[in-house]
Every structure is written in structure tokens, then in C-alpha cells.
Image (tube, grey):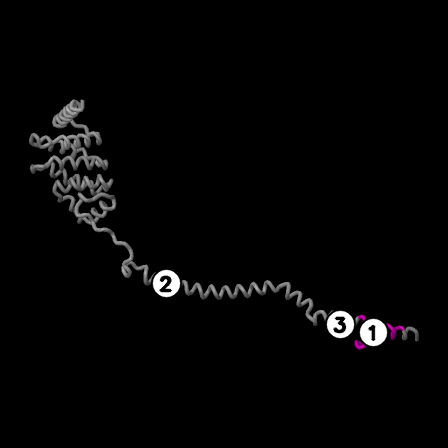
Amino acid sequence: AESASSRRGSRSPPPSEQPPALVVSTASSVGEHADGHPKNRRRKRFAWMDSDDEEDEVEGDAKGSGGGSCANNSRSGSSSGDDPDASGSHARDPPLPASFAEVETFSQMMRMMEAQPRGTLLRMPMPELAGVCQAAARAKYYEASVVGDVTSAAKVHLRGRASIKPQDIADVVAGLADINAYDRELFELAIQAVGGLLPGQLDGIQRRRILEALKKTNHQSESPILRSLQLQQAAARYEEACHEV
């Protein structure tokens, strides 16, 4: 009987007869979740994350719409204003010099040579070849193919029987020497051409220019014409020195 009563005493009461403390703790536990205090704290704790996500979404939308408008503006600007043929805003190249005598810069010389038809240099008369050599010297222009055509054409004229002006001979050899375009055969032909000039045709200035070009290129020659030119130049310097004293 006692064991039966003890078993009855130890039997758990039905849910409706739970002890008040347990009911209160359960209620309090449920109440904490029900009234939202922990959830509110959780919301407050992660509220900054939600706000940043919302701001990022807003900024992303703004950038997307703004980027599209900028891209559209850039495309419209490039299609309307960047085409030099359409707008004509870009500066065009200046006109070519009228002749090689007017060439002063490297770009002018390069454009002049590009504008020459193929084989033009080979058919140029001696005065024009002299102008090309002087223009190349002023512009510091050197192109192997151009120098080759100029020297070939000048040799033809120097071997010919036609009279050549001393200034043209001096312009050719001096111009080629200034751009370090030495051709031994051409310089030797130039010396021979000077020897065929009439007395008085070669003045002191042209003689000095020819001798300076030969010295600059270290041209060696046994020609008596060159020796005569050197003696004439030495006499001219001596006479000038006497006048200065």
C-alpha cells in the first residue's frame, strides 16, 4: 500500500497542475520571446547591416542609371564631336613649302620627300639637287635612299659636259658633308669639276666651303686641282691677316 501510494505520489501531475514556478519561468521565457525584447536587441544589433544593404542598393541603382547616362553622353559626344572629318576641329597639316629652298625643319623635309614621285631625284637638274642637299643639312635629315638618289644624280651631272655653277658644286658637297653622307667618287668628281671652271668663276667663299667639306669628310686626294685650291685659300688667309694688322 505504501509503495503504491509512493508511486502515486511520485507520478507527475498533469500539465494543468504544473508548479507555479515552472509555469512562471516558462511564461517568462515565452514572454521574453513574445514581447520581442531579445528580438528587438537582435534587430538593433544588426540594424546597421540592414541600413548599409539598403544604401548599397540605392547607390547601385543610382550608379546604374547615372553610368548609363554618362555612357550615352560619351557615345553621343564621340559620335558627334570626335570625328575630325565631321567637325573639322582638328588642326590640319600646314601646306608644303613651295621649294626645298624654303625647308627649315625636319618635318617639312620629310613631308617634301614623301610628296616627291618615285625617281624624281634621279631626274633633277644640278641646281635642284644642290637645294635638296642644303635643305637636308638645315633640317638634319638623312635617309639612305634619298642620299643614294641624290649622289647618283649629282655624279651624272659632274661627269657631263654641261657647265656647272661653282655654287651648286659647293652646295652639294657641303650639304652632304653636314649630314655625314660622304661619297668618295662624288667628292673627287667635284674637285675635277672645279678644275674645269674658268678663271675667276670660283670666288673665295665657295672655295672655302668646298675645302671645309673635304676636310670634314677627311677626303684624301692626290689631285693637283685640290693642291691648287689649298694654296689659293692659304694665300687668301694670309692676305686677310695682313689687312687686319
Q: Is residue 54 left or right of residue 169?
A: right
The verdict on residue 7 being magenta is: yes
Q: Main secondary structure of the magenta part?
A: helix
Quadrant location of the C terminus in the rendered image: top left
Q: Residue at x 24, y 44 (%)?
A: 105
The region drawn magenta spans 6-21
- Residues 86 and 12: in front is 86
Residue linked to disc 3: 27
Q: Position of residue 40 (x, y in %)?
A: 66, 67
User: Could you tell me the amino acid type at mark 1?
Assistant: Ser
Which one is nearer the viewer's eye here, 229 or 98? 98
Q: Earlier in the sequence, mark 1 or mark 2?
A: 1
Outermost residue, right side: 1
Tell me which corner region of the image, top left, top right, bottom left or bottom right, holds residue 34.
bottom right
Whether residue 222 appears in this view of the structure is no
What secondary structure is found at the residue carrying circle 1?
Answer: loop
Asked if disc 1 and disc 2 are in contact, CB closer than 8 Å, the reply is no
- What amino acid is labelled 2 in the image? Arg
Q: CA distance from mark 1 to mark 3?
A: 20 Å
- x, y percent for residue 223: 13, 27
Q: Establish if 215 lies above or below 144.
A: above
Q: Secondary structure at mark 3?
A: helix
Residue 188: say if magenta.
no
* Residue position for label 2: 75
Mark 1 or mark 3: whose residue is earlier in sequence:
1
| Left/right of residue 179 with respect to residue 30 in the rendered view | left
Residue bearing the label numbered 1: 12
Q: Is residue 10 above or below residue 244?
A: below
